[in-house]
Image (spheres, helix red, strand yellow):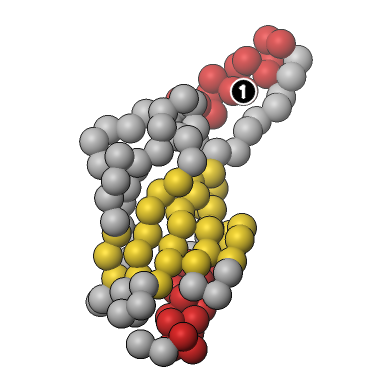
Amino acid sequence: MSDGARAARLRDEVLRLANRNWDLRERTRFEAVMAYPLTPSGFEVIVTVIAGILTGSGAATVDYREVRIWVDEAGGIHRRTIGDLPPRRRRKGRAWEVPDTDGPGARTVFDEGPRQT
């Protein structure tokens, strides 16, 4: 596959994820890093509100899932979740490594995944 076709495949994938509310963090010609804000559970929201009332601090944090996307020489799209798991997100098997695609020809590459903090 030509370099131009590989770059076009990455561009299309970045646009597809951007349309699903992923933020582009870094990008090179054949590789990109994107982040997705994780929705807290109802329990986390309640605990944050109560802690804010009791302590007077209403600081809520947003956790992000980051994924590295790259296109290989054959045009295959690969994804790997990168970075550490947010402290309140526990890994349950490969639940963190969910496929980010609904299109043909793309696959998620599993590894040991992000480290839990």
Where in the figure is residue 34, as x and y percent of width and height? 53, 58
Instruction: Locate the N terminus by quadrant.
Output: bottom left
Q: Residue at x 53, y 44 (%)?
A: 64
Q: Residue at x 26, y 76 (%)?
A: 105
Q: Amino acid at mark 1?
A: Val
Q: Secondary structure at mark 1?
A: helix
Where in the figure is residue 71, as x and y percent of width and height? 40, 72
**Relative to 54, does residue 87 appear above or below in the rendering?**
below
Q: Is residue 69 left or right of residue 106?
A: right
Quarter where residue 47 is shown = top right
**Relative to 116, does residue 97 appear above or below in the rendering?**
below
Which of the pair 75/51 is nearer the observer?
75
Q: Residue at x 62, y 15 (%)?
A: 51
Where in the figure is residue 26, as x and y percent of width and height? 61, 61
Crowding at mark 1 (Cα within 10 Å: few <14, some 14-19, many 20+): some
Q: Is residue 76 left or right of residue 55?
A: left
Quarter where residue 76 is shown = bottom left
Which of the pair 50/7 is nearer the observer?
7
Q: Which residue is mark 1?
A: 49
Residue 12 visible in the current orientation: no
Q: Is residue 107 left or right of residue 81?
A: left
